[in-house]
Amino acid sequence: MLILLRFAHSGENMVKVKSVEEAVENYVIGVIQGAFKTKRYWMKQGYDEEHAIKNAINYAIGQIKAGISIDRKEIEATISKFREMAEIANALADSLNIALNNPPAT
């Protein structure tokens, strides 16, 4: 999968070719964002969290099926990206929690 982007630089057209890895990373970020928004939507509609998450997962799986090839290597890379994003999100939440509970001395 190659993605071509055209952009202007000093009046010239230049082409940037994204790597498969970069394209998958961007796609995974978009799927996570969409799943988050889907969960929020269903919560606002009055559904419980379990139902909202189930709908968000169904949305995300549909997006992955539509956008990621069935190639095992690409699916494994996608799983790895999701796990990496979860680790970063959890570490950030932990850091914010520590900062919240240990405000700087004034």
Image (tube, rainbow, N blue to C red):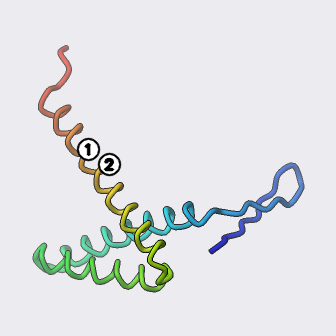
- The dot on residue 91 is 1
Circle 2: residue type: Ile
Q: Amino acid at mark 1?
A: Ala
Indicate the position of residue 13 as horizontal and vertical percent values.
85, 61
Q: Nearer the viewer, residue 46 or 65?
A: 65
Q: Quadrant of residue 15?
A: bottom right
Q: Nearer the viewer, residue 93 or 76?
A: 76
Q: Nearer the viewer, residue 83 or 90?
A: 83
- The residue sitting at the right extreme is 11
Q: Residue placed farthest to the front in the image? A: 72
Quarter holding the N terminus is: bottom right
The residue to which callout 2 is attached is: 88
The answer to whether the residues at label 1 and label 2 have Cβ atoms under 8 Å apart is yes
Residue 19 appears left or right of 79: right
**What residue is at 35 percent from the left and 77 percent from the top?**
60
Q: Residue at x 30, y 68 (%)?
A: 36
Q: Position of residue 48 (x, y in %)?
A: 10, 76
Q: Is residue 40 left or right of residue 27?
A: left
